[in-house]
Image: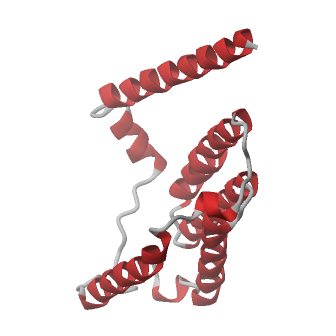
Amino acid sequence: MPHGDFQPIAFSVIAAWILVAAVGVVTLRNIVHSAIAMVFCFLGVAAIYALLHAELLAIVQILIYVGAISVVILFAIMLTEAQSGPVAMFFNRQSIFALPLSVGVAGVVSAALISAQLPGVGSKALNPGVWQISKALLSEAVFPFELISLVLLAAMIGAILLARREEEDR
């Protein structure tokens, strides 16, 4: 990536967008609204990938996370009875420790990243294209790739059977 190619203003705007969406995921009382905020968070991550010229990762992020994972989570939410509740249901006695702990972890990770010897902006990134990834998936990693598709198929069949049983019980 050439030195003048990075857009810090766009990165800052998208990073703020991701943070606002992530805070919405954990603080909104309605779980459907929380899931929608999660979709916006995933879209922000895809925008960061696109900004960093990792177009394949951006497309995969949209297809898998925004498309598949979010739809599965929304279906799971729609199948549950309670979609919102009192604040006490979502927060408990341990949540008072969560904020200082998360700030502490963020500080440690930030200190580790600042002190690390990371490559500079002008260094060449390893960004394989679609051809290299598809060749790897369909040659060296064909067995795990097919095994994952069978696991996903079994999960879909199980979800359909569970939904049918609930329908028959009514």
| Residue at horizontal 69 percent and vertical 42 percent from the top | 74
Q: Quadrant of the N terminus?
A: bottom left
Q: Quadrant of the C terminus?
A: top right
List x then y, in percent, for residue 152. Answer: 49, 27
Seen in the picture, residue 12 relative to 91 is either above or below; the reply is below
Query: Foreground residue, 157 or 8?
Result: 157
- The quarter of the displayed image where residue 34 is located: bottom right
- The quarter of the displayed image where residue 55 is located: bottom right
* 23 sits to left or right of 123: right
List x then y, in percent, for residue 118. Answer: 28, 82
| Residue at horizontal 62 percent and vertical 57 percent from the top | 89
Seen in the picture, residue 149 relative to 25 is either above or below; the reply is above
List x then y, in percent, for residue 104. Answer: 36, 83
* 4 sits to left or right of 68: left
| Residue at horizontal 73 percent and vertical 47 percent from the top | 83
Query: Foreground residue, 93 or 150?
Result: 93
Query: Foreground residue, 132 or 20?
Result: 20
For the image shown, how many numbered marks are present on the structure?
0
* Colouring method of the image: secondary structure
Seen in the picture, residue 16 relative to 160 is either above or below; the reply is below
